[in-house]
């Protein structure tokens, strides 16, 4: 009788483990990224960095909850006269990490996250280099749609993107102690 109970218990445990593995434990995403910056209403200044790239990785320690690391780079050349007399090349580089919750509903998988980290901005023009690094966070989410077992499309990810470049920062675009920015991303996910 003990052998039968042991075998039944073992089958139940193995069955629970097999059911628990019906979702990917890790995902890698990459693609295009757009950054919209807070210029404080400065007239005639480009607010959008349309050139950008993101890469993120998430490890799911439970079916719905995981930890994400996110890297993003955006660049833009401001034409002559917008923020300085010669044209200025600006690069924004960021790294964030934090919890992600993903709701798995068949092929459609919406997610939400709160990511914390830093942003480094640098600008070069007319032989002058300016740069600064500040705390930043991303609050948002998006939608992945599975197209194959190990492949999904990130149809969109939208984030409120707070940066804390101080009033005296060389790269502060709005003259305040914080900037209310937004990002939009789309790409592919391998899992």
Image: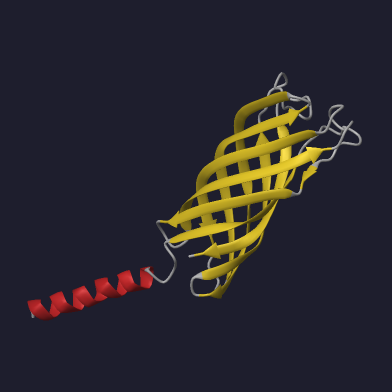
- Scheme of colours in the image: secondary structure
Vertical comparison of 150 with 118: above or below: below
Is 78 on the left or on the right of 103, as rendered?
Answer: right
Q: Position of residue 174 (x, y in %)?
A: 79, 29
Q: Position of residue 115 (x, y in %)?
A: 56, 44
Q: Position of residue 72 (x, y in %)?
A: 61, 45
Of the 4 image quadrants, the one containing the N terminus is bottom left
Which residue is located at x 57 percent, y 50 percent? 113
**19 or 122: nearer the viewer:** 122
Vertical comparison of 15 with 181: above or below: below
- Outermost residue, top side: 168
Q: Position of residue 190 (x, y in %)?
A: 51, 64
Q: Quadrant of residue 168?
A: top right
- Outermost residue, front side: 127
**Number of numbered markers:** 0
Vertical comparison of 62 with 159: above or below: below
**47 or 180: nearer the viewer:** 47
Is 69 on the left or on the right of 85, as rendered?
Answer: left
Q: Quadrant of residue 147?
A: bottom right
Q: Quadrant of residue 73?
A: top right
**186 or 131: nearer the viewer:** 131
């Amino acid at each position: 009788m003990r052998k039968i109970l042991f075998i039944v218990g073992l089958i139940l445990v193995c069955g629970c483990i097999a059911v628990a593995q019906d979702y990917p434990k890790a995902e890698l995403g990459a693609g295009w990224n757009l950054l919209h910056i807070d210029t404080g209403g400065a007239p005639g200044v480009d607010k959008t960095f349309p050139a950008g790239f993101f890469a993120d990785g998430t490890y799911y320690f439970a079916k719905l909850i995981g930890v994400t690391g996110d890297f993003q780079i955006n660049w833009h050349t401001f034409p002559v006269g917008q923020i300085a007399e010669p044209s200025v090349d600006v690069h924004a580089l960021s790294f964030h990490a934090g919890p992600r919750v993903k709701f798995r509903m068949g092929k459609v998988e919406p997610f939400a996250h709160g990511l914390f980290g830093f942003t480094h901005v640098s600008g070069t023009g007319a032989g002058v280099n300016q740069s600064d690094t500040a705390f930043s966070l991303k609050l948002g989410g998006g939608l992945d749609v599975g197209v194959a077992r190990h492949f999904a499309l990130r149809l969109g990810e939208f984030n409120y993107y707070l940066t804390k470049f101080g009033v005296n920062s060389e790269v502060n675009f709005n003259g305040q102690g914080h900037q209310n920015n937004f990002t939009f991303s789309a790409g592919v996910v391998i899992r």
